[in-house]
Amino acid sequence: DTEVTQTPKHLVMGMTNKKSLKCEQHMGHRAMYWYKQKAKKPPELMFVYSYEKLSINESVPSRFSPECPNSSLLNLHLHALQPEDSALYLCASSYSDRPNEKLFFGSGTQLSVL
Amino acid sequence: GQQLNQSPQSMFIQEGEDVSMNCTSSSIFNTWLWYKQEPGEGPVLLIALYKAGELTSNGRLTAQFGITRKDSFLNISASIPSDVGIYFCAGLYAGGTSYGKLTFGQGTILTVHP
């Protein structure tokens, strides 16, 4: 099983809403990632969790709040987003955060902020 | 930080033709990964390369890790319509502030005409 599952698939929210994106993997991976991707552009790293601890925050605005409740789950809490935050949000996981590990991506959540 | 130059940016080919794309960098990488992404989906890992000079195949796909560790190429033989998508190279670097971070190329958009 090399699957990373993301929910919801699509999300539309207003600028005053609070919503959460969810990601789950059961591959025993200990590193999990959030990426943001604009259309036809490469993914951009947002956060890295290693062994359930936040190890990298790529200067992401505080309106994005990650959470790793356990080794299989990763959430991204959204609050007071801007229209320019509309994008495909990808979760990924790898066995560890060592620099030779393959990353496996989920299908993403397509987010639209109105 | 590391940057990857991926070329070509787009390709329009006839079914049955072979395809070649490559990535180059001014910095060395320890691992090269090639992903394919279809609309509305996350990137899917095609091939992972770990050693300079390594040549790896996955069906009709062949990729090589350049001996200078600064480049990689991906070939697709006898293309078919379902090869359509965006192909991304990605490099992993061990060292400095980029430890454990994937650096993505800008992507090659492949269109295959039946």
Image (cartoon, helix red, strand yellow):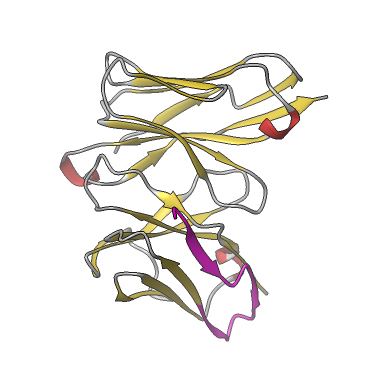
- In the image, residue A91 lies at what x, y percent? 45, 60
Q: In this view, does A98 lie above or below A79?
A: above
**Front residue (pair A11, A15):** A11
The residue furthest left is B96
- In the image, residue B79 lies at what x, y percent? 68, 21
Region in magenta = A1-20
Q: In which quarter of the image is the C terminus of chain B?
A: top right
Task: Answer with the quarter of the image where residue B64 lies.
Answer: top left
Task: Answer with the quarter of the image where residue A13 lies.
Answer: bottom right
- In the image, residue B7 lies at what x, y percent? 53, 22
Q: Is residue A35 above or below residue B53?
A: below
**Front residue (pair B4, B73):** B73
Judge left or right: residue B95 versus residue B25: left
Q: Write the residue at 21% across / 65% down.
A: A51
Judge left or right: residue B8 versus residue A91: right
The residue furthest right is B114
- Number of marks in the image? 0
Q: In which quarter of the image is the N terminus of chain B?
A: top left
- In the image, residue B52 lies at what x, y percent? 27, 19
Q: In this view, does A53 lie above or below B42?
A: below
**Front residue (pair B32, B23):** B32
Q: Verify whether residue A114 appears in magenta.
A: no
Q: Write the residue at 64% across / 14% down.
A: B18
Q: Is residue A42 above or below residue A25?
A: above
